[in-house]
Image (cartoon, rainbow, N blue to C red):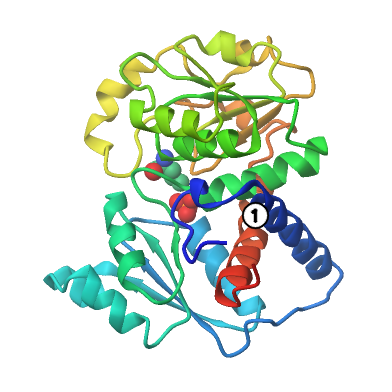
Amino acid sequence: MKKDLLSLLDLEKDDFIYLLDRAANFKKRFNQGIHDRPLTGKSLGLIFDKKSTRTRIAFETAMIQLGGTPIYMSTQDTQISRNEPAKDTARVLSRYIDALAMRTFDHSIVEEFAAASSIPVINALTDSFHPCQVLSDIMTIIENKGRYENLKISWVGDGNNVAHSWINAAAILGLNLFVASPKGYFVSEDIRAEALEHGGSQIVYTDDPKEAADNADVIYTDVWASMGQEEELKKRLNDFAGFQVNKELLAGAKDDVLVMHCLPAHRGEEIAEDVLEAENAVFWDQAENKRHIHKAILETLILKNR
Ligand code: CP
Ligand code: NVA
């Protein structure tokens, strides 16, 4: 595997399979009360420039449970906020810690850190991608459907960072992915072109949520205004009319459709309250699986197992 995990295009298909399998193994053993500690003596830095509940705590608990130590730094508390360059910070941190998980705005920031660090850099969400999220989502699909192939997986909503990572995953794994977004909120041409280069010719892009939802095995949504886009919310609420995942939209899907959301969810906006609380909504499993997949990522990158 590459040194860093910045986007899912950094992974080969075999890397996906390895990480998903390893995470399932960690989960099984943890639930049996077996506590593996392969990262004893290792430390993980977390530099977060945006809010987080799940990703931060899933990384911190993953590291602790594997015997290592997480060190959380809000960007505001570091010299980065006083303009110390990324390439200096990255070289210094490489002398202290064994891996760095970063959540920030522009994707070029994690790329700069990765280029200057001798340690693995893991993207814990940027404006462009959320790779670790989609790995735990695929793990959740496998748990519920036994596979990820030959399923109609539909994204209904903004062409945002999570959608981008789904498109990357679909390209590498050959997923049957539909991406429905309102006009003006489509994923960028660059993301689509890159997916095509990696074999994603089967991905369907549409502005019709019903086309995506009909006969779907999985329907995934996310907030209409991501972190950093709060000021656009009013306009977006208007522009995304008809894209709410609700009972009406789900009526066309398969009876056993899985409803997914990376959370946090905005009830009454991208998702209806009754859908959110329904049994086929697997959000809580997605959230739990972040911890297991983070373990697989941390172990593999820190110990250079692959
Ligand atoms: N899904 C997700 O990344 O959640 P947080 O923003 O709480 O980390
Ligand atoms: N698209 C959302 C995901 C949050 C986990 C955001 O970037 O805010």
Q: Quadrant of residue 153?
A: top right
- Quadrant housing residue 232: top left
Residue 215 in percent (x, y) is at 71, 13
Ligand 2 rendered quadrant = top left
Residue 15 versus residue 57 in the image, above or below: above
Q: Residue furthest right?
A: 32
Q: Position of residue 183 (x, y in %)?
A: 35, 13
Q: Position of residue 133 (x, y in %)?
A: 54, 49
Give the image location of residue 20, x and y in percent.
71, 53
- Which residue sits at x=31%, y=23%? 236
Find disc 1 in the rendering and name its residue: 15
- Whether residue 159 is visible: no
Q: Quadrant of the N terminus?
A: bottom right
Question: Furthest residue to the bottom?
Answer: 41
Amino acid type at circle 1 is Asp
Image quarter where the C terminus lies is bottom right
Residue at the (49%, 28%) spot, across then down:
196
| Residue at figure coordinates x 68%, y 9% from the top left | 252
Depth check, front residue: 145 or 55: 145
- As helix, strand or loop, the secondary structure at mark 1 comes to helix
Asked if one can make out residue 298 in the rendered structure from this viewpoint, the answer is yes
Q: With 49 as the anchor, is 64 left or right in this view?
A: right
Residue that appears at 60% across and 62% down: 294
Q: Residues within 10 Å of mark 1 (few under 14, many from 20)?
A: some
Q: Nearer the viewer, residue 261 or 153?
A: 153
- The answer to whether residue 302 is above or below residue 172 is below
